[in-house]
RNA sequence: GCCCUGGUAGUAUAGUCCGGUCUAGUAUAGGCGGCUGUCGCCCGCCCGACCCGGGUUCAAAUCCCGGCCAGGGCGCCA
């Protein structure tokens, strides 16, 4: 079929902005055909755009033949433009409809779509992810990513207001010696390099110059993890603050979480309703459980964990039932945390690291960092790491490393919390895991 | 990497236990036709599928073995 060009048409309103008050006014709408209900003498076309939907009503005998033939040719997902008159009406749920005066078809679509975009017949996640560009057109998914966007916007504003500077650290790094998580190797000209798993060392180095920094960006972990809360590429929101300790950044984090829930609740009312999800705004301060208290809680539930061990997933699930919302876990055994977490001055068996939990899911982790070079080297050795491999990082500790603390929060996990999604892949536009590299 | 469960039209499912009745049912989508107030529109007709390979058997969607893929769980996750 012959396609139209946009010409001098420009959008005057999004679908959601077409309200009964505009009765009688001409609007230009752009979007996609979401649904067509043809009753013979009258045809209802649901136009969808980023902000929602609006009904285009085509009464056969009342529109000109050109509009009629265009309207008859439309099919699902055609990209269209409609110039028409807003009509206030009692008959539609939204209280408005648009009677077209002119219709443009910008693009057609395959008649047999791989998934049902209305959601009458739900598709499996696998099928949805294979058809992700189309899947993302579903209103439910638009809602998820608008909420994610709102959260990122809120977090950035919050941190800017508190004097944090947004930074960008390298994604390509030279050494695999940070320990722990497996790294993805890459060819870097003739050398071997790796994709960064965290900005940890860089953001610590930056506190000696920029003092308060944050970064929002992707990181990579080549783990075998195959769960609904792990990805091999994820977005981390990382902060690091000079002249601070764990409690300072924990307060920052709980205020930030409360504020994020509050703003998302206000600004994303439509999206939350669409997802059929109620987001509670939590009270601060959040519970602070010590590692010992957690072991005790679990013991009462019949789960024994030897002191010093990390807490296994099933135990976290139990814990999430006892503490059903946000809470911190503090006073971890030093041996269970990363080498850069500061041991307590009065009891070096314990450290100033913390986990920030939402039910049974770890949303963030952080802590006071070690500022002393000697201690850091000692901890590296205890962890079986070679200080020589860290010489470029360690130099920062020769130039006046202040006391500092920070945390990192997983954006996709945060999005799961904010949207009620149960699989992290739904909170990621194009998820990457061990088995999925496309689309 | 390990354990459990599963793989049937574009999509979602029934059938699998207990082989034959399956020419594989249903819904939805798609095609064609009809319908002037639908909003999961409705009505009629049509199209369309047993993951791959091997085995058992007179006979396999169904039982067995291997593979691939998916979901869930575990481990791993500074």
Image (tube, grey):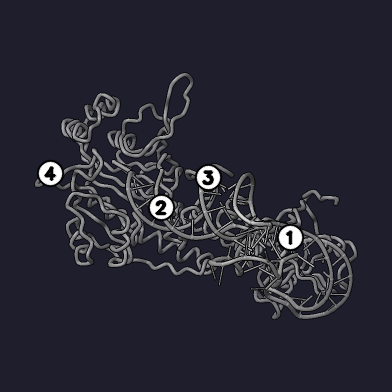
Task: Indicate which label's residue lies in the foreground, 4 or 2.
Answer: 4
Q: Mark 3 and 1 residues: CB-CB less than 8 Å, in contact?
A: no
Quickly name the residue at label 4.
A348
In the picture of the structure, the residue carrying the numbered disc 1 is A76
Marked residue nearer the N-terminal end (1 or 4): 1
Closer to the camera, A166 or A116?
A116
The structure residue drawn at horizontal position 32% and vertical position 55%, both measured from the top left corner, is A313
**Between disc 1 and disc 2, whose residue precedes?**
1
Front label number (3 vs 1): 3
| Front tag of 1 and 2 | 1
* Helix, strand or loop for disc 2: helix
Q: Crowding near pointer 1: few (<14 within 10 Å), some, many (20+)?
A: many
Which residue corresponds to mark 2? A155
> Badges 4 and 3: C-beta atoms under 8 Å apart?
no
Q: Are marks 1 and 4 on the same chain?
A: yes
* Badge 1 vs badge 4, beta-carbon distance below 8 Å: no
- Same chain under badges 3 and 1? The reply is yes
Instruction: Point out residue A197 in the picture as x, y percentages from the top left corner.
Output: 38, 38
Q: How many marks?
A: 4
For residue A16, say whether it is visible.
Answer: no
Q: Is B4 in front, or is B59? A: B59
Write down the chain letter for disc 1: A
In this rendering, would A193 be left or right of A327?
A: right
Q: Which residue is mark 3?
A: A436
Mark 2 — on which chain does it sit?
A
């Amino acid at each position: 079929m012959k396609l139209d060009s946009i010409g001098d048409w420009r959008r005057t309103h999004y679908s959601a902005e077409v309200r009964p008050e505009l009765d009688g006014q001409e609007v230009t709408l752009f979007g996609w055909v979401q649904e067509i209900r043809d009753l013979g003498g009258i045809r209802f076309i649901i136009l969808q755009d980023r902000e929602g939907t609006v009904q285009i009503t085509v009464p056969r005998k009342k529109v000109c033949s050109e509009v009629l033939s265009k309207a008859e040719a439309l099919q699902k997902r055609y990209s269209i433009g409609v110039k028409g008159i807003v009509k206030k009406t009692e008959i539609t749920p939204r209280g408005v409809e648009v009677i077209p005066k002119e219709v443009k078809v910008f693009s057609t679509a395959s008649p047999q779509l791989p998934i049902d975009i209305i959601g009458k017949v739900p598709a499996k996640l696998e099928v949805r992810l294979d058809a992700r560009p189309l899947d993302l057109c579903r209103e439910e998914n638009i809602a998820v990513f608008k909420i994610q966007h709102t959260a990122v916007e809120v977090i950035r504003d919050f941190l800017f207001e508190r004097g944090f500077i947004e930074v960008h650290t390298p994604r390509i790094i030279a050494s695999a010696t940070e320990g722990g998580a497996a790294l993805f190797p890459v060819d870097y000209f003739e050398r071997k390099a790796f994709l960064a798993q965290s900005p940890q060392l860089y953001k610590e180095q930056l506190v000696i110059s920029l003092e308060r920094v944050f970064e929002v960006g992707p990181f990579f972990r080549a783990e075998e993890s195959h769960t609904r809360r792990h990805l091999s590429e994820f977005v981390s929101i990382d902060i690091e603050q000079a002249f601070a300790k764990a409690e300072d950044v924990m307060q920052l984090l709980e205020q930030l979480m409360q504020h994020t829930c509050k703003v998302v609740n206000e600004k994303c009312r439509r999206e939350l309703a669409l997802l059929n999800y109620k987001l509670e705004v939590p009270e601060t301060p959040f519970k602070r459980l010590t590692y010992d208290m957690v072991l005790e809680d679990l013991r009462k539930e019949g789960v024994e964990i030897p002191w010093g061990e990390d807490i296994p997933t099933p135990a976290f699930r139990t814990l999430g039932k006892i503490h059903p919302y946000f809470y911190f876990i503090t006073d971890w055994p030093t041996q269970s945390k990363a080498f850069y977490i500061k041991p307590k001055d009065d009891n070096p068996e314990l450290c100033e690291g913390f986990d920030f939990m939402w039910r049974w899911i770890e949303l963030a982790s952080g802590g006071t960092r070690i500022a002393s070079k000697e201690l850091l080297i000692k901890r590296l050795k205890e962890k079986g790491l070679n200080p020589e491999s860290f010489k470029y990082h360690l130099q920062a500790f020769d130039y006046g490393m202040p006391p500092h603390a920070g945390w990192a929060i997983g954006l996709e996990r945060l999005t799961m919390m904010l949207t009620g999604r149960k699989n992290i892949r739904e909170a990621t536009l194009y998820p990457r895991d061990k088995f999925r590299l496309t689309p």
